[in-house]
Structures are given as C-alpha cells and as structure tokens.
Image (tube, grey):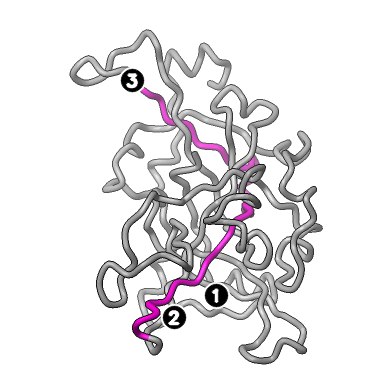
Amino acid sequence: MCGRYATTTDPGRLAVELDAIDETDTTGDQGAFANYNVAPTTQILTVVERHEHGRTDDEPTLRIRRMRWGLIPGWTKAAEPGVPAKGKPLFNARADKAAGAPSFRDAVKYRRCLVPMDGWYEWVVEPNAAGAKGKVAKQPYYMANADGSRLYMAGLWSVWRDRAQPGSEPLLSCAILTTDAIGDLTRIHDRMPLPMPQQRWDDWLDPDHPAPASLLATPGAEAVAGIVPRPVSMLVNSVRNNGPELLARVTDHAEAGQIGLL
C-alpha cells in the first residue's frame, strides 16, 4: 500500500496550472499521459521545487519531472555500468518512520515531492469467497475525490548515479509516503497515501529546509473528506489491463454491500 493508482494528468497542462517548468520528455506521444493502472517501476509524474543548477541564491521554481516509482538510494551500488543493483522495492515509505530510515532520511530533509493522481486502488479480502484454485478472493476498490478533482500525495525522491561513470545520466526515483488510514477509508485498508494540501506545498517542497514534522503526521479527517471508495472490476489485478473501464463501479458485489460501499 499504496501499490497501484490511476492518473490522467497531462504534464504540459499541469505545468500551466501550477506555473511550473515542464521538464518531462515532450518528444513522445502527447496522448500517452493517461495511465489507469500505474504500478511500481513505472515512470511517473512528480512535482518538485528546485533551484537552477549552480544558482542556489535564486528563488526555487516548481518543476514537473518524471521519475521511476521505486526509490533507489543514492548509495546503491551498480550491478553493471549505469544500472543500479536490485534491492527491496521502495515504492512506499512510512511517514512516521522515514526520517530515521537510511533509505529515506536524506530525502526527508531536502528532496520531497508531490505525486499527482486521480485516485488509488486497494484490495479487500473476502473471507467467505474462494477465488481461482481455492485462493481467497480480493475485491479491488478505487479511492478518489467525489468531484473528480486531482489528488496530490506526499513523496520522497532520490538521485542515483554510477560513480564509476561520472558522465552518465542521473536516475531519478521516488516513493509515495503512507500514513494511517482515517475516516471511511479505514474500512478498506489500515494505510493510505499521505495527502498534501496545497496550502502546505511551500513548506513541503522547500529544497533548502527540512519539512516541519507536522507534515509527516497523520492528517485530520478533513484531508480525506471528499474521497469516496468504490468497488471496481478485478481487471485492475493485472497490469496488462489499462483503460477507463478499470474505474467503473461494480454494482452487484456482495462483499462491497456488506461494508456499505455499494
């Protein structure tokens, strides 16, 4: 958790909305920004605030960047030239423990980001339903703002370089912070991504100062007041499925009715 989400954010439009610099690759298919089944190791959109290179006296600016979802600590060794060694998939970081974790503590201080998304998925175990080959079935749920507005989740990011190849391109990667679930979301899972309200972005993205500890705390119920869970198709279980049909509400699922979400 959070291990899958959906986004239809156009980086160019996002840059205009936020008065940010679009640093994503604009040479590819401009209609390929929608992804209804984002999984770890995917290149995802992030929002950071950085100075111009070598000009730390200037005011930092918002920038839209693509990063690998799954943070690679800067101290990771190279498995082969330009390729980091594989380790534990760090696509999530606990907000209450990240500041003390070797993989995340530097990022907590100076490399924090926002991860824009439309909503995220979680799975509810059905104790009375048998899946394929006798396995316990799980019903996927999609959590999103009822009004369809975009969510911004708190994230951490890292820069990895092969030290043996100083001229190689840096690899940017990130993790989404998670916190205790609150409100109705506790019926779905005990954890959730950490939402970051826009009025706290300046403090969260500040590249020159550590974030206030209060921003890493579990937020109040107002932070998720507009978020509504809904049961969706099991098509989302496979990353090979990717389309708006993954977000369609399932209306005839017994377990969903039992927990009051139909």
Looking at the picture, which amino acid does disc 2 mark?
Thr
Q: Of label 1 and label 3, which has the lower sequence position?
A: 1
In the picture of the structure, the residue carrying the numbered disc 2 is: 26
SS for dot 3: strand
Q: Is residue 12 visible?
A: yes
Please state the horizontal and vertical placement of residue 129, each as a whole percent of the image.
34, 12
Dots 1, 2 in contact, CB < 8 A: yes
Q: Residues within 10 Å of mark 3 (few under 14, many from 20)?
A: some
Instruction: Please name the residue shown 43% across and 13% down the image.
Output: 254
209 relative to 250, above or below: below
142 relative to 202, above or below: above
Q: Is residue 151 visible?
A: no
Residue 252 falls in which quadrant of the image? top left
Image: magenta residue range? 137-165
Is residue 151 or residue 98 the one in the foreground?
Answer: 98
Is residue 219 or residue 132 the one in the foreground?
Answer: 219
In the picture of the structure, the residue carrying the numbered disc 1 is: 12
Calculate the distance from the C-alpha at mark 3 to the C-alpha at mark 2.
41 Å
Is residue 240 or residue 4 the one in the foreground?
Answer: 4
Q: Would residue 129 appear left or right of 192 to someone viewing this image?
A: left
Q: Of label 1 and label 2, which has the lower sequence position?
A: 1
